[in-house]
Image (cartoon, helix red, strand yellow):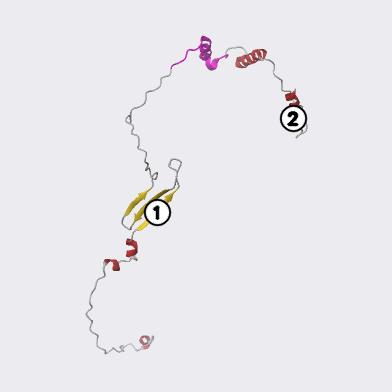
Amino acid sequence: MGLFDRLLAPRGSTPPANNTPAKPKKEVESFFLDADASSSMGNVDFMRRSNTIRHTFPGTADSPGNKEMIAEVASMESKLEMMSEGLAGISSQPETVDLSGGIPKPVKKTFAQTMSAAELEQRKKGSAFGVNVPGGPAAIKQEQERSASAQVPSQPQISKQASGKAGAIDPFKQMVRDLNS
């Protein structure tokens, strides 16, 4: 039976029928797999076995030394076998219980100190000090500077340096002479 036999055959002709008798179907025995063999999860025994996992940690300033945690882990359960002191909040120091939890501490009372009448008058003036004075606050400040300079012994005045070439060290030499004199 070729590929083109059907196309090239005349229209009225029918293909030859196979005269072989049909084979009777065999009676098949049915069987079932157990749950482990029928699953497609892989090696179930490998997944069911338990593994012991050991974690190590460095110490801290509060709890120096190496720390260790050993856990036995299976696919469906885990069990902590050993944990070093100082891990996850475990400590040998008993926790202190504060029985006054929620009760606020008494407020420390502070008292105002007495101030002189002159200081009180100065504070009352505030930022309006010298507003209605001829010359304004700048004139008052200059007057205070003059009176302060008359009371303080004379300090060496910084002389204005003549501007020279850029990078010249003459101003520095002059400064050293002023310091040494």
**Residue 176: x percent and y percent?**
74, 27
Q: Earlier in the sequence, mark 1 or mark 2?
A: 1
Magenta span: chief secondary structure? helix
In this picture, which residue range is highlighted in magenta?
Answer: 111-130
Residue under the image location 29 percent in, 66 percent down: 36
Residue type, numbered disc 1 = Arg
What's the residue type where badge 2 is placed?
Phe
Residue 30 included in the magenta stretch of the image: no
Which of the labelled discs sits on residue 54, or is there none?
1
Query: Is residue 163 visible from the viewing direction of this image?
Result: no
Give the residue at mark 2: 172
The percent position of residue 168, horizontal first and vertical second, equals 77, 33
**As drawn, 146 above or below 65:** above
Tell me what residue is drawn at x 35 percent, y 86 percent: 6
In the picture, measured across the screen, residue 114 lies left or right of residue 24, that is right
Nearer to me, 48 or 175: 48
Q: Nearer the viewer, mark 1 or mark 2?
A: 1
Total numbered labels placed on residues in the image: 2
